[in-house]
Image: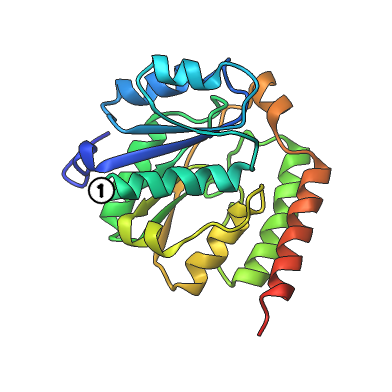
Amino acid sequence: MRNDQSPDLKTVWIVVPALNEATTIADVVTGLADLGYPNICVVDDGSRDATAEEATANGAHVLSHIINFGQGAALQTGISYALGKGARYVCTFDADGQHSPKSIDSLLTALLGARADVALGSRFVTKTSAVPRRRRLLLGAALLFTRFHARLNVTDTHNGLRAFTRRAAELITINQAHMAHASEILQKIGTAKLSFVEVPVEVSYSLYSRRKGQSGFDFIKILLDLLYRSIALRP
């Protein structure tokens, strides 16, 4: 619900990284547009289906990678584009239909209400969560690693719902091209000493989104990527 803490929607850009999401991207874009958000940027990350065409047909700004670079790279492409267009607030949103468009309202309200630099969506702020047990265990392992490495007391490390002020978006450059970008963002929030607020959000795990989700092997790769990077960047 919008109130006095809500920003001018023309200053908000929503970045949606997408890979082979022709099935869901039209609903995602129209769902956000129906709430009054005029600036939706879909980054087609080398899709082999009609993702770009569907997004364009439904009014999104569409940027296309010729090949698949990874979700982190797609987010950085979209964020850079939004900043170049004068965005005051940049939000990130998944393309598989598991997020409610109304979550963007909640993130922005919390961001402005707390006068924070970043608002992070979390499935675990409250006791109830629809996260499948196996995924919850994998997320728990990633959470422990991130808390130790980033020294950031968060409850959810891999949630695609985020809202940044312009200042925060300019200070956080995503270098991890693939799924380790989520933990990298948290590390950079800590390093830059940006203020943040966590916001409870609901995630709908449909059969489609479960098939598109990360496997246990993906999480192992994420942890190895982060560990390698942390060692490589040591002075």
Q: Is residue 154 visible?
A: no
Identify the secondary structure beneath mark 1: loop
| Rendered view: 235 above or below 112 | below
For this orientation, the residue located farthest to the right is: 217
Compared with residue 82, is residue 203 higher up or lower down, i.e. above or below? above
Counting from the top left corner in percent of width and height, residue 157 is at 60, 53
The outermost residue toward the left is: 4
Q: Is residue 123 left or right of residue 10?
A: right
Q: Quadrant of the N terminus?
A: top left
Q: Residue 179's spot in the image, x, y percent?
A: 66, 47
Q: Residue furthest front?
A: 66
Q: Residue at x 45, y 21 (%)?
A: 55
Q: Nearer the viewer, residue 180 or 50?
A: 50
Pointer 1: what residue? 86
Q: Extreme bottom residue here?
A: 235
Q: Amino acid at mark 1?
A: Gly
